[in-house]
Amino acid sequence: MEGAWEIAFVLFQVWLSIVVGLIVLPAMFGVSLGFTDIYIKVLVKTLEWATLRIQRGQKEQPTLPSQSANGIIEKDDGSMEEEIGELRRSHPKNLAGGDFTMCDAFYFCKKGIENIVEDQVTQRFTSEELASWNLLTRTNNNFRYISVRLTIIWGLGVFIRYCILLPLRITLAVIGLSWLVIGTTLVGLLPSCNAKNWLSDLVHITCYRICARGLSATIRYHNKENRPKKGGICVANHTSPIDIVILANDGCYAMVGQVHGGLMGVIQRSIVRSCPHVWFERSEMKDRHAVAKRLKDHIADKTKLPILIFPEGTCINNTSVMMFKKGSFEIGGTIYPVAIKYDPQFGDAFWNSAKYNMVSYLLRMMTSWAIVCNVWYLPPMTRQDGEDAVQFANRVKSAIAHQGGLVDLSWDGGLKREKVKESFKEEQQKMYSSMIVGQQGRLMLSILI
């Protein structure tokens, strides 16, 4: 029995030495030995071969009707006036001052049924569809053909992901988080000075780099000259909790969020000792003025790290950018927009919080092939004269969506848990009424509402 323990201890030492020597130490110095690049290249070749095998098999078997490019059903992109005009074939030109006709009801029935089948909001909180299978069981819903060779490769992939990559990634995550807690706690004991700030930045970026290696992350940063500067606000689209790890690999940020308990609380209490992060109690989060004041005080000090905020307030599935909350754009200061786009071929980074808890999500991430993404730093933006906070937020959101190749949506991401606001319904009523009763009726309707 003692001999077995000795062998296990020796194997553990060898394992830890390999991890520290080949991964942790290079990560601490921001150096790559090229193992991840070779792994990604082999993975790309394997997935390309699997795609060809699937396509060859699909040619030999009857195919199912393909899904619409826009989703489950085809939707018209025309305006309300254009679509109702098509229904009123007998007199489409009388919309601006005409009467209500029964055929108008068909437009609203059609729109209602379309949104019951597939609305623009719900589909943003499900995993992104893949063009071809990436050899993960969780993404095999639309691929029915599995050959013998493909099944063997898939089985080998399961062994690699769960028996090699998962233990390696857990080891790296434990090392990274432990060093983050210990390092920031020790740095927090030092008096405030430039050396303390430098050590704090070094500890943070080192730990995040180790955690990124634990996900086999390959990150390409573009336009680094636009990286957020101290005293500013960095805003980005939100797909996953690991967005923080992705961004913090290339620079340090002050985090904003609610105080938590458990392991997350331990991490929060330790990192705030070395760096002025902005944590709020649950009661404070409901006080918008208190939140705004603390954020204003932070950005007023040009020696403090830029604040990192995700204005959507929830995770979106890597296909779209939804409404930005205006609070981040009311406090003033310079906004540094950042667009993040993940490559779903190697793993689904989206966190569906309604379906998976944090532990289940992290397990899925650690058993995926890799995390591959692009990060674009956009030029800094400030609020223009005559522009309110909502307009400024929409302008920043549009810039991020355009750069990341994402769909720009005006819907609030909170709709996945809440009902549609009455103001959205009233807007549709105003549009239809203006077509029926004309400009004069529109003015009367706005006065009544």
Image (cartoon, rainbow, N blue to C red):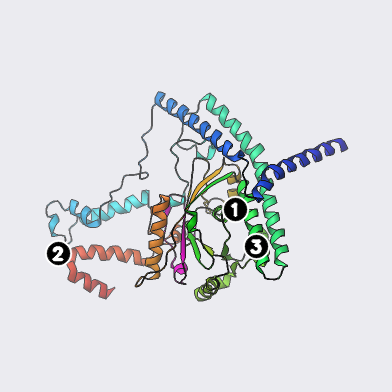
| Residue of label 3 | 198
- Comparing marks 3 and 2, which lies closer to the viewer? 3
The one of 441 and 203 positioned closer to us in this rendering: 203
Residue 258 on image: x %, y %: 58, 66
In the rendered image, which quarter contains the N terminus? top right
Q: What residue is shown with label 2?
A: 97
Of mark 3 and mark 1, the one earlier in the sequence is 3
> Residue at image x 70%, y 50%?
175
Amino acid carrying label 3: it is Trp
Dot 2, how many residues are within 10 Å of its Cα: few (below 14), some (14-19), or many (20+)? some
Residue range in magenta is 312-338
Q: How many marks?
A: 3
> Overall secondary structure of the magenta stretch?
loop
* Viewer-nearest residue: 135 or 447: 135
> How would you rate the neighbour count of disc 1 (Cα within 10 Å): few for under 14, some for 14-19, many for 20 or more?
few
> What residue occupies the far right of the structure in this picture?
2
Across and down, in percent, residue 134 comes to 51, 36
User: Where is residue 123 drawn, in percent x and y?
Assistant: 42, 50
- The quarter in which the C terminus is drawn is bottom left
Does 243 sit left or right of 424 as displayed? right
Q: Residue 36 carries which label?
A: none
Residue that badge 1 annotates: 358
Q: Distance between the residues labelled 3 and 2?
A: 69 Å
The answer to which quarter of the image holds residue 409 is bottom left
Residue sitting at 49 percent across and 43 percent down? 344
Instruction: Specify the amino acid type for callout 2.
Output: Gly
